[in-house]
Every structure is written in C-alpha cells, then in structure tokens.
Image (cartoon, helix red, strand yellow):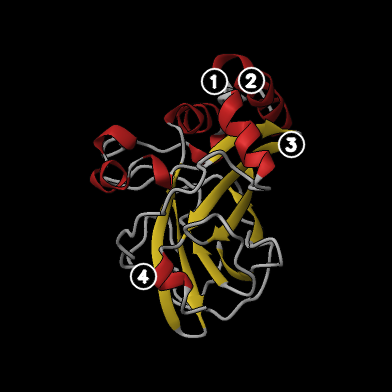
C-alpha cells in the first residue's frame, strides 16, 4: 500500500521527466520576462467563454480557496493586462472550479450530493500594481463531458468585463487523475480531455495556463489580456 505522501512524491518525481515540465520556448520566455509578464502567452487577448451554470459570488476576498478540500496543491497566478501588455491595477478577479470529485460548491445535484451552503474553491482577489492576483487551490477534477478547467471573471465593481475559463495541458491532468486517490472514481465514463472538449477547442491556446512543477505541487500562470474597449472601462 502506498500512502498519500508517497503518491505525492511519486507524482513530483514523475512530472518533470514523464510530463515534460519546463518546456517553454526560450524566445517567448525572454519576451515575457522583459515585459514582466508571468507567462509566455504574450499580448494575446483572452477569449470570452461561457460562464457555465455554477457561478455565484460568495463575497469572499481570499487567496486560499481550498477550505480543506483534498487534492493536489495548485498555485494559480493570474495577471490582467490590456492589449498593449500594460498591467491593470485594481481589477477584481473571481475564480471558481470543481473539487477533485467534480463537485461545485453552492449547488444541489452534484457528484456527491447537495453542496448548497458550501463555498469551497471560490474566491476573489484584486489585482496589484503589476496586474497580478494569486490563489492557493487544488488541481481541478473532472465531471461528465468536461476537461479540467477553472472559471474566472474580471470585473469592475459589479460589471463583468470578461468571463473565461482556464485550461491546462492534458499530460498534467492525466498524471493527477491516474495517480492520486483523491481523484479516483468508480467509473471514468464521461471523462474527456482538451481535444474532446468543445469549449476548450474554441477557446484555443490563449486560454491555456503555463504549468510547472514546484515543490509540493503545481504552479499555473496565465496572462489575461483585455481588449482596449474593455480595459478602458477600468
């Protein structure tokens, strides 16, 4: 029998070699550093994607959104910029996603029953002077017909400037789902990955986070690029 700590260690060892962590094009990485961006999707406008059925605002200004939910640790770093890659300070960023077993907080009819009254894996941060907001969370699980993803909104007060979804390279999701017991399910029927998820395909590469292995978990970074008309409202 392998305990949880050993499984985490095994995943950490496997990820850099088997999963190819750190394969970032040097030119893009250099450009991102020069512009002080946190990821190499330089100056791409982030696509609008569907909000989905599970959004609500629990009015929780917090960086750690885990609330004790089990799962593989994930540091999620976002940076909001305009079309010219200039950081946007003071934007409100909401994130929400399902847990390791595919449950969203706050709603009935979930994989593990009624989750009304719960607020796990939801939170809000305001961007700092560099346009950055960060969250401590877990790698999102899956539910029927959807690949692993995180929802986000960029808002000005109550005005929704951009609603999107963040996707991740399949190799990381496969490793997490196949190796960690928190993500184990009685059946994988309905489990899909990015190439079969219509929303992920339509969103394209501008909606993918740059993922690396760090001590104790994964780090995912993405630059959220607002179009000029939306950024002008801030």
Q: Name the residue under label 2.
A: 16
Which comes sooner in the sequence, label 4 or label 2?
2
| Residue 28 location (% of width, % of height) | 56, 32
Disc 2 secondary structure class: helix
Disc 4 secondary structure class: loop
Identity of the residue furthest to the bottom in this view:
158
Q: Which of marks 3 and 2 is in front?
A: 2
Q: Which of marks 1 and 4 is in front?
A: 1
Q: Is 23 left, or right, of 12 in this rendering?
A: left
| Residue 70 location (% of width, % of height) | 61, 49
Q: Name the residue under label 4.
A: 108
Q: Which residue is drawn at 35% across and 48% down?
A: 143
Crowd around label 4: few <14 · some 14–19 · many ≥20 (10 Å): some
Q: Distance between the residues labelled 1 and 4?
A: 36 Å
Disc 1 secondary structure class: loop
| Residue 98 location (% of width, % of height) | 46, 55
Q: Is 218 left, or right, of 216 in this rendering?
A: left
Is disc 3 in contact with disc 4, using a CB cutoff of under 8 Å?
no
Crowd around label 1: few <14 · some 14–19 · many ≥20 (10 Å): some
Q: Name the residue under label 3.
A: 216
Q: Nearer the viewer, mark 4 or mark 2?
A: 2
Of residues 198 and 67, the one nearer the viewer is 198
């Amino acid at each position: 029998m392998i305990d949880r700590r050993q499984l985490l260690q095994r995943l950490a060892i496997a990820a850099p070699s088997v999963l190819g962590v750190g394969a970032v094009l040097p030119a893009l990485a250099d450009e991102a550093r020069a512009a002080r961006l946190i990821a190499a999707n330089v100056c791409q406008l982030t696509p609008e994607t569907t909000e989905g059925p599970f959004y609500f605002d629990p009015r929780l200004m917090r960086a750690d959104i885990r609330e004790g939910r089990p799962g593989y640790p994930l540091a999620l770093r976002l940076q909001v910029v305009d079309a010219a890659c200039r950081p946007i300070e003071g934007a409100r960023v909401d994130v929400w996603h399902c847990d390791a077993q595919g449950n969203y907080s706050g709603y009935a009819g979930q994989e593990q029953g009624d989750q009304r009254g719960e607020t796990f894996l939801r939170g809000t941060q305001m961007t700092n002077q560099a346009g950055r907001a960060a969250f401590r969370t877990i790698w999102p699980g899956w539910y029927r017909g959807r690949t692993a993803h995180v929802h986000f909104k960029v808002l000005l007060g109550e005005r929704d400037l951009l609603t999107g979804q963040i996707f991740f390279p399949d190799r990381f999701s496969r490793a997490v789902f196949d190796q960690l017991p928190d993500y184990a399910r009685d059946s994988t029927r309905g489990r899909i990955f990015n190439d079969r998820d219509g929303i992920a395909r339509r969103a394209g590469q501008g909606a993918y986070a740059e993922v690396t292995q760090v001590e104790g978990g994964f780090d995912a970074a993405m630059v959220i690029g607002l179009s000029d008309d939306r950024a002008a409202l801030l």
